[in-house]
Image: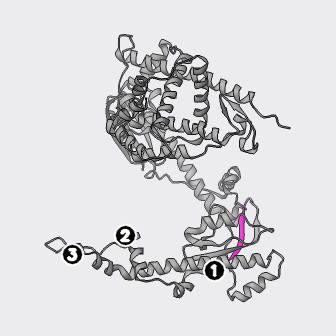
């Protein structure tokens, strides 16, 4: 078999290959307490049998999950989430256990070859098996010490056996005629549409408000205005500019920094009046930007020095055992000769505005502080470094109406505008339908209906299509209306973020529902395969749950 694999096993992209290696190397220890009776890593030395694997053994866990990860990656062409891998691994192990119980023979070379040609990891852009991709995978495999041809042959061979079991469990897949017709109608009905989009931004109704209306809106939507918990804090600042004079480097450092960051220091633009292409002169290009490179390198190293100084400062606080009531803090700050800088109270979501782009990081650290821990670790900032000092955490509270009146007024106006936009949609639809009955085209009816309103309307004709072969740029809002429409009907105004859309069905052709239609047979097979897989998966899920329950550790 290995000789066959060496001769035939050819292919794959380097990026996908790297993912496969990752799946083999990583130890998958992430069993959920609900499915597996707790984290096996908590029970050192615990033996928990699961279809031939010991879930209490890290080696068995890695073998179970590694094989499943590799199998899934080959089949779908990309990495799955950890939870998906775990579920797949359990069902795969159950399938192989059943294969052993049924005495199914190992996969033969022909079966493995056929299986390889179906794997999406080796498919080209047309979805068909690509020998070049396969050859690349084999070439990369030769230089990998952790993944061998024997591993690949074993995993693919096991997948062949697991597929056989799943087909036996699922059976032929039973499908009702009505199911086939419903799916055919959904996928192969031909739609010819016209749309009219109403621009929400251009819709500007006159909306006034009284304090009574605003107060009522405020009370009904109080949750929108609750002020989140806020931290009151100050900070010790370590600006990088204080350490610029201490930042040292040599010519080699400057050149290396330039070469490592080419996008930050583009060479000067070529003379647009030049008649001949400029010669490449790396030395001259470097010399032209050397000053900028030195400044950037000096500031970066000054930032490192600032971060070190901040870390040393935190260590001095630790050594002095500084607490909320400790007098040692005042002495340390006095020796530093730099008072703490106050911060405006901030929430977890906004962070201190004084920290600019580092505000979110500062907020996360600040909300870890309290009476038992009043200072943070050293925080890197765009300007250097800082250490936060906690004063208090203000609890969440409902503000008085007067505090948030401006925001309430803005929200009220937007809410009323949205309501009136919906009302406009009902009115326009009625006008459009009346004009259609009078003989107008949909485009003319839509434009005429919107005359006299502030809203701008844009119409569009969408040629015949089916959902099976729909245009790639077709708006999902349009698709979501189709199941409720027949020929000649106009949809309600389907509202998205910045517009509302009317959909008019100018033509609707139902596909042939007779069994002689090739699409009928194809759809029937697809649904049968789906129901078969569903039945198989349900049986395997029950089998996995029973096995996990059987081997569940007894909690004392």
Q: Residue 309, labelled with which disc? A: 1
> How would you classify the magenta stretch by its main secondary structure?
strand
Outermost residue to the front: 3
**Kind of element beneath mark 3:** loop
Mark 2 surroundings: few (<14), some (14-19) or many (≥20) residues within 10 A: few
- 168, above or below 439, in the image: above
Q: Which residues are magenta?
A: 229-235
Q: Quadrant of the C terminus?
A: top right
| Dot 2 or dot 3, earlier in sequence | 2
What's the distance in space between the residues labelled 2 and 1, CA to CA?
30 Å
| Residue 39 visible in the snapshot | no
From the viewer's perspective, is the residue at label 2 or at label 3 nearer?
2
Query: In percent of the image, x 78 and y 34: which residue is there?
Result: 553
Question: Which residue is tagged 2?
Answer: 262
Q: Quadrant of the N terminus?
A: top left
**Kind of element beneath mark 1:** helix
Q: Where residue 527 sits in the image (x, y, percent)? A: 47, 20
* Left or right of 514 in this view: 326: right
**Kind of element beneath mark 2:** helix
| Dot 1 or dot 3, earlier in sequence | 3
* Left or right of 152 in this view: 225: right
* Left or right of 74 in this view: 96: right
What's the distance in space between the residues labelled 2 and 3, CA to CA?
20 Å
């Amino acid at each position: 078999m290995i000789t066959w694999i060496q001769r035939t096993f050819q292919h794959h992209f380097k990026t996908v290959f790297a993912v496969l290696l990752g799946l083999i190397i990583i130890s998958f220890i992430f069993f959920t307490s609900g499915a597996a009776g707790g984290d096996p890593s908590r029970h050192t030395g615990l033996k928990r049998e699961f279809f031939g694997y010991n879930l209490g053994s890290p080696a068995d866990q890695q073998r179970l999950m590694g094989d499943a990860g590799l199998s899934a990656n080959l089949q779908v062409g990309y990495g799955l989430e950890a939870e998906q891998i775990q579920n797949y691994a359990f069902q795969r192990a159950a399938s192989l256990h059943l294969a052993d119980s049924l005495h199914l023979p190992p996969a033969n070379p022909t079966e493995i070859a056929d299986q390889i040609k179906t794997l999406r990891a080796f498919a080209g852009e047309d979805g068909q098996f690509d020998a070049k991709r396969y050859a690349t995978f084999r070439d990369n495999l030769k230089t990998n010490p952790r993944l061998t041809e024997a591993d690949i042959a074993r995993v693919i061979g096991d997948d062949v056996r697991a597929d056989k079991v799943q087909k036996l469990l699922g059976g032929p897949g039973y499908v009702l005629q009505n199911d086939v017709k419903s799916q055919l109608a959904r996928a192969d009905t031909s739609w010819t549409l016209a749309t009219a989009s109403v621009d929400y931004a251009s819709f500007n109704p006159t909306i006034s408000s009284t304090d009574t209306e605003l107060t009522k809106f405020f009370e009904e939507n109080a949750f929108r205005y609750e002020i989140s918990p806020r931290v009151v804090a100050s900070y010790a600042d370590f600006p990088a500019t204080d350490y610029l004079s201490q930042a040292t480097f040599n010519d080699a450092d400057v050149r290396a920094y330039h070469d490592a960051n080419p996008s930050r220091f583009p060479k000067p633009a070529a003379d647009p009046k030049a008649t001949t292409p400029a010669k490449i002169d790396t030395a001259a290009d470097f010399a032209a930007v050397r000053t900028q490179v030195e400044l950037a390198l000096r500031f970066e190293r000054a930032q490192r020095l600032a971060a070190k100084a901040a870390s040393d400062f935190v260590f001095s606080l630790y050594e002095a055992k500084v607490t909320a009531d400790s007098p040692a803090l005042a002495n340390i700050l006095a020796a530093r000769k730099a008072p703490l800088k106050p911060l405006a109270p901030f929430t977890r979501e906004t962070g201190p505005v004084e920290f600019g782009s580092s505000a979110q990081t500062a907020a996360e650290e600040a909300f870890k502080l309290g009476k038992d821990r009043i200072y943070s670790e050293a925080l890197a900032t765009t300007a250097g470094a800082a250490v936060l000092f906690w004063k208090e955490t203000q609890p969440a509270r409902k503000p008085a109406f007067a505090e948030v009146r401006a925001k309430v007024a803005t929200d009220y106006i937007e809410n009323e505008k949205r309501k009136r936009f919906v009302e406009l949609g009902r009115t326009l639809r009625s006008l459009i339908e009346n004009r259609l009955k009078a003989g107008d085209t949909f485009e003319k009816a839509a434009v005429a209906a919107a005359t006299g309103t502030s809203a701008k309307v844009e119409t569009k004709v969408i040629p015949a299509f089916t959902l099976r072969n729909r245009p790639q740029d077709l708006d999902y809002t349009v698709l979501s209306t189709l199941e409720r429409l027949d020929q000649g009907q106009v949809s309600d105004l389907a509202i998205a973020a910045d517009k509302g859309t009317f959909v008019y069905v100018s033509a609707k052709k139902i596909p042939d529902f007779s069994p002689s239609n090739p699409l009928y047979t194809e759809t029937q097979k697809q649904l049968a395969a789906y129901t078969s897989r569903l039945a198989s998966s349900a049986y395997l899920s029950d089998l996995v749950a029973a096995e996990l329950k059987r081997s569940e550790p007894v909690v004392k």
